Amino acid sequence: MLTLSDFDFALPPELIAQTALPERSASRLLEVAHEDKDKGQTTRLIDRRFADLPHCLEPGDLLVFNDTKVLKARLLGQKASGGKIEVLVERLTGECTALVQIRASKSPAPGSTLRLADAFNVTVGERVEPFYTLHFPRACLPLIEQYGRLPLPPYIAHDPNAVDETRYQTVFAQNPGAVAAPTAGLHFDSALLDQLDARGVKRATLTLHVGAGTFQPVRTENLAEHTMHSEWYQLPAALVDQIAATRARGKRVIAVGTTAMRALEAAARDAEAAGHPLAATSAETTIFITPGYRFRVVDRLVTNFHLPKSTLLMLVSAFAGVEPIRAAYRHAIAGRYRFFSYGDAMLLTRAEGA
């Protein structure tokens, strides 16, 4: 049985990308290709540029993107006592309410008032572990976007600047609600999307609002004891139709990012459990994909390099195989690939039996 320690690795700190490259599609792409030999399946690692992606796909393949948009979810403020606080919005729950994390020297009491950005007051509502409910004086989305700060990941050391405002957002972001970017999508620019269209690669979108829990490490050695964070997703009917059409023409479904993967696989797993085919849906998911999971929809995956001991590293290991991923990460570290949100990417193919 695999344990948490099986997903640890040593990463030189200088390989953690702190800034985005000048051009989105200028990043590197490590393709992990499975080849069937007489004695079984072998893995080949191919160093590419991300701009090569259209040539790695076939006309009629379907790329599925997550069109969530990152909120300016970090707000600074103070309690009535004058104590400083930091609020990180986890998700919007209503027009004037949100679930948030609050960092303070002492936890605020329900009913207390907080002053945010020295601009407006909010009221602390019920505790929903590990979050608080905040009541805003009016529609919270415009207030968050006007007074909040971009919530860069904890491993990026600088404060967000004008470049981050653009580059920590995909070019196809439409639906506000995420507190972290679907980072595999950051590599795509308009020119690359045009090249994919010209090659005959199809495109579709879903929405999964990425929560701050995506950065939380697994803390229990026994993976079965880990409690997965919940995220909201929506699968539109148009995407379901495109998946069916892709299957009918014998082509592949390619998830752009682990968030798109989780939404697709959660919807397919739940539909199968209910005894009906994949259908349009919106739901919460706590799906935790580890080696041994049986994939139902996704054939290939575009993804960044993930943190040690993270649920996302477990997901890609389940998809491409534990040993191929270990080999790929060793190769990437030796080859000085850039890691995490602003880093380079991988193109994975589902392993035999997954």
Image: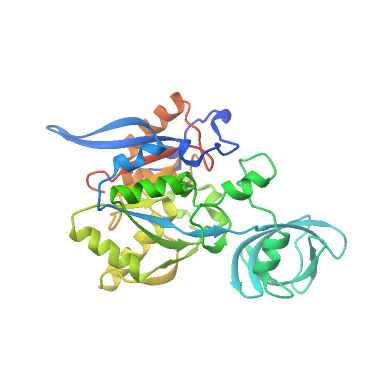
Residue at (40, 51) in percent of width and height: 256
The quarter of the image holding the N terminus is top left
Q: Is residue 229 above or below residue 191?
A: below
The answer to whether 237 appears left or right of 307 in the picture is left
Which residue is the extreme one toward the left?
38
Q: Is residue 4 above or below residue 226?
A: above
Residue 277: image quadrant is bottom left
Residue 187 is situated, as x and y percent measured from the top left of the image, at: 47, 44
The answer to whether 7 appears left or right of 114 in the picture is left
Which residue is the extreme one toward the top?
334
Residue at (25, 53) in percent of width and height: 60
Residue at (38, 69) in percent of width and height: 236
Q: Is residue 322 above or below residue 70?
A: above
The answer to whether 234 appears left or right of 238 in the picture is right
Q: Which color mode does the image show?
A: rainbow
Residue at (63, 50) in percent of width and height: 165
Q: Nearer the viewer, residue 99 or 203?
A: 203
Residue 321 is situated, as x and y percent measured from the top left of the image, at: 31, 41
Residue 120 is situated, as x and y percent measured from the top left of the image, at: 79, 68
Q: Is residue 206 visible?
A: yes
Q: Nearer the viewer, residue 300 or 307?
A: 300
Residue 282 is situated, as x and y percent measured from the top left of the image, at: 43, 71
Q: Is residue 133 visible?
A: no
What is the tally of numbered marks visible in this picture?
0
Residue 147: image quadrant is bottom right
Which residue is the extreme one toward the right?
81
